[in-house]
Image: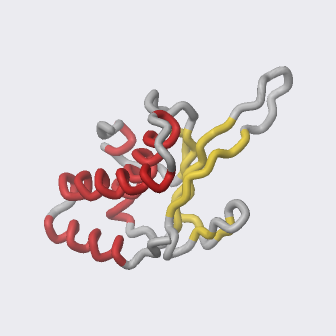
Amino acid sequence: MENGHILRGRIEIRGWYYDERIPYRVWYSFRLPDLTLSGDLELNNQHPAWTILTPDKCIIDSPPSNSLSMYFHKSIPHCFTHQVLYHELFEAEQMYSNKINQPVAHTLAVKATEEFAQQTLSPKEFTFFQNWVSSLSSE
């Protein structure tokens, strides 16, 4: 995944993102409190980001459609916003465009995100990023 324009500049707290590599429009929202998103998906400091397919509100005389919703917890260090968003976009691209199952897509996203972080962060920030990632739940 190339670094799309959303990853180059300032990221708003919430908004829509379009990328031709992902077959859905993407809604993202940062700085959220602890939440239960869908069933047993908990958004918290141990699980700081989730991406789920959500139904769009029905528009009269339109076929049902979905959006990809990305939720980001308030505990994500501000300096890693781009890297965490990159991870979620990369994983979504693998799952919804390349038809790769979620566990494999996640593994690929972890590797790609580490490379992206190493390219975009200073050595000191990258070490902090690695320590932060290692503190997250592996579930």
Question: Camera-side residue: 41 or 13?
Answer: 41
Q: Residue 97: x, y in percent?
A: 48, 34
Specify the quadrant of the image occupied by residue 64: top right
Specify the quadrant of the image occupied by residue 89: top left
Q: Residue furthest bottom?
A: 135
Q: Residue 62: x, y in percent?
A: 79, 23
Number of marks: 0
Q: Residue 78: x, y in percent?
A: 38, 65
The residue at the point 43 percent across, 68 percent down is 76
The residue at the point 33 percent across, 38 percent down is 1
Q: Which residue lies furthest to the top in this view?
A: 61
- Answer above or below: position of 136 versus 7: below
Question: Camera-side residue: 95 or 11?
Answer: 95
The type of colouring in the image is secondary structure
Q: Image check: 133 left or right of 20?
A: left
Specify the quadrant of the image occupied by residue 44: bottom right
The residue at the point 61 percent across, 51 percent down is 52
Q: Residue 34: x, y in percent?
A: 61, 73
- Answer above or below: position of 69 versus 73: above
The residue at the point 35 percent across, 51 percent down is 108
Q: Residue furthest right?
A: 60
Q: Image check: 52 left or right of 111?
A: right
